[in-house]
Structure formats: structure tokens, C-alpha cells
Amino acid sequence: MALANASRRLAQSLLRPLGSAQSPLGALGLQQRGIAEPAAAEDTSLTVEVRPFSAHRIEPPSTTVTTDRAELLKFFTSMYRMRRMEIAADMLYKAKFIRGFCHLYDGQEAILEGIEAALEYTDSIITSYRDHCTHLGRGGTVVEVMAELMGRVDGAAKGMGGSMHMYKKEHNFYGGQGIVGAQIPVGAGLAFAHKYREDGGVALTMYGDGAANQGQKYEALNIAALWDLPCIFIIENNHYGMGTAEWRGSKSSSFYTRGDYTPGLKVDGMDVLAVKQAMTFAKQYAQKNGPILMEMDTYRYHGHSMSDPGSTYRTRDEISQIRQLRDPVEHVRKLLTDNNLASTSELKAIEKDVKKEIDAAVDKAKNSPIPPDEALWKNIYKDTLGGKMKGLDSSVKIQL
């Protein structure tokens, strides 16, 4: 009974506004997020009230955000591209074009889109294994992601990394990490590099609620605070670490407060404007003062990975209600159409173009060659020492 009650409380909290004040809309799980004040007819600017930020040891940023038609259309197009790419990856996995691990990001798109709206490519990002859309946000292409997923040479890591190891060093994206939480101290190291070089950049080290209790996180947080490193620790709290609900794995799931001496913010991670506002604030803080924690309240639609149906530890009704009330793509669509900044037909045309783009990228990735045999031992030894590698058939020997 206790577990059932706790599960119900979690489901209810996912639909509840982040702030404590409840309006009539808030009681329905809608709150103020979609309420906007159109600007004068001669321009396309828009003022939006986002959900209140919860704060720890810091005054939160304003909940009033200004945007415009061009930015909202960019957000819509980019997030829809992420969504369609992940749906295509799901289909390719089921058709066995993609093998091994594959962790999808659909439902969480507003986090990366809002983050990138506040950053430059001179800032650094490192994340976990759920990294396909991070690569897009850092200026990568759908072809690079799809080719990497299928192990082809046109992939982000030349087909040798796979789903968990996208990478784009020229834009300071230091990849996805397959070991849970291992990227957190590396992110602090990237922040140290920015401070050492005095280049004004910040480092984002991103991880999920499942990694939030690890000791290496607290070691990294301690040294970042001790040395005032420009590091932003981002917890993407999608409420389930694999199949374990946050309340079952964490004594306190108010992750933004658990930096102790380090300030923190809790942000509606399903609202791209809220994320943009919070990230702009956090970057300015980190540049001047050192580390800050940001908990992004979000939700993944797929299971933990493609081997997880995602329905054994949560109900289909819960997933459906999140889609209806908090979907990040639909939220931007509503802002555009409700405020006469774009027509339904215009957005449908964008969706059609994105679908064509994804289809073309998939075809190109499928036609990309697989890496040559010698790629198997590349970057291991400088001199191969004349060894031989046994093939699948023990009679086959490949000269190194």
C-alpha cells in the first residue's frame, strides 16, 4: 500500500506546476506556462510568463521571458527535428539496422534547445549516454547521428562509437559517456580548463537522477566550489533511473538543493523558454561566482533504452497525460498559433520538410560504408607489432 501511494504521488507531481502557488489552470496541471501577452501588431515580439523557479541559496531569475516569432519558429523546427530523428532511430532499431545500446531523448527536447539558446560553441558540454540530440544542439547533423548509430564511417565518431559516444570537439562537445556518472568529474575538469585559459567559457556537465547520488558527483562539486570553477551541473530529472522511480532511489529527490553550499535552481525542463531563461542566468552566475546546480524537471517518452518497454514501472495513462499537458513541442506550437505568430498550415509545412530531411538523412546513412577492418585496432597501439587478429571463423586471420 505504501508503495502504491508513493507511486500515485509521483504521478501527480509530474503533472503539477513547479511553483507552490496554484491558479485554476494550475489545478488542471496547466498553470501559467501557455499564457502570453502579444506585443503591438507592428512587431512579432511576445512576453510569456513561465512557471516559477524553485531556488536554493540564490534569488531565482524573473519568470517573465521575452521572445519573438523567429525564435519560436527556430525552437519548433529544431525540437521537431530532434523528435523525428529519435522516432526514426526507434524504427531503425526495431528493423535491426541499429544494434546494441540505444537511449532515446524524445520528450526532453526543450532542455537542449533552451540550453543552446543561452550558450556559445566556445562553452563546453559533456553528457551521459542519452546524447543523440546533444550532438544536434552542438551543430552536428542528422546524418552524423544516424550513421554513427548504424556504425558507418560518416558517423559522428566515424562509426566506432555508437549510440552512447557522439562527439564534436570543434564545438566543444566532449561526447556521451557509457559509464553512469563518469562524465560529471570530467565536466568539472573542462570548467577548470576554461578558468585556466581565462577564455570566459563555462562547462556543462549533464547527468540524470539515476546518477545524482554518486560519490564522484560530490567530489567534483566540492573541487568546483573550492576553486570557483565555471561549472554548471545539470540534472535531467526524468523521474526514473532505468526502472527505478526517484523516490525509491533517493532519500531526497530535491536534487537542486543537494549541492549544500552550492546554489541551485529547479526548472520546468519541458518549457524551452524557462530553460533558456534559467540557463542565461546560470551562465552569468557561473562566470562570476563558480558552480551552480540546475535540476531540469522533464520526462522521457520511451523506456530507459530500446530494451525497456517503459510501461512496467509506470502507467500508460501517466505517459499519455504528460504528452497532453506538458509536451515541449506542442507547447511552442500553441504559443505560435494562439498568438497569431504562425498558422497551422505553416507549421504543418515545417513538419513535412523536417520529415523529408530525416528520411534523406537515414537513406544517406544507410549508404555510408562500414569502417574498414583496420579501424578495429586504430588508436590502440602506435606500432601494431605485426600481430594477427582472429576472425569470426577461427581459420580467418587478419594481419594487423
Image (cartoon, rainbow, N blue to C red):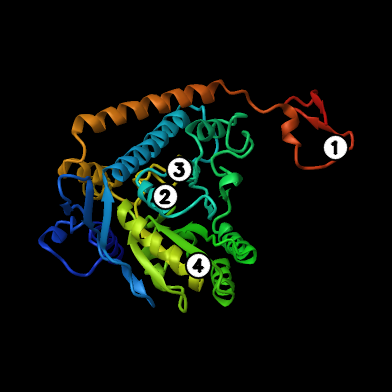
**Of callouts 2 and 1, the N-terminal one:** 2
Mark 3 Cα shell of 10 Å, populated few (<14), some (14-19), many (≥20): many
Residue behind mark 2:
112
Number of residues whose C-alpha sits closer than 10 Å to that of mark 1, classed few (under 14), some (14–19) or many (20 or more): few
Q: Identify the residue at image location x=24%, y=31%.
A: 346
Front-lying residue, 382 or 5:
382
Q: Amino acid at mark 4?
A: Gln
Residue at point 17%, 53% (across, down): 36
User: Is residue 44 left or right of 56 when viewed as pictured?
Assistant: left
Per the image, the residue denoted by label 3 is 133
**Type of the residue with mark 2:** Leu
For this view, does 241 lie left or right of residue 324?
right
Q: Quadrant of residue 191?
A: bottom right
Secondary structure, mark 2, is helix
Query: Farthest front residue?
Result: 42
Residue type at mark 3 is Cys
Nearer-the-camera pick, 357 or 71 = 71
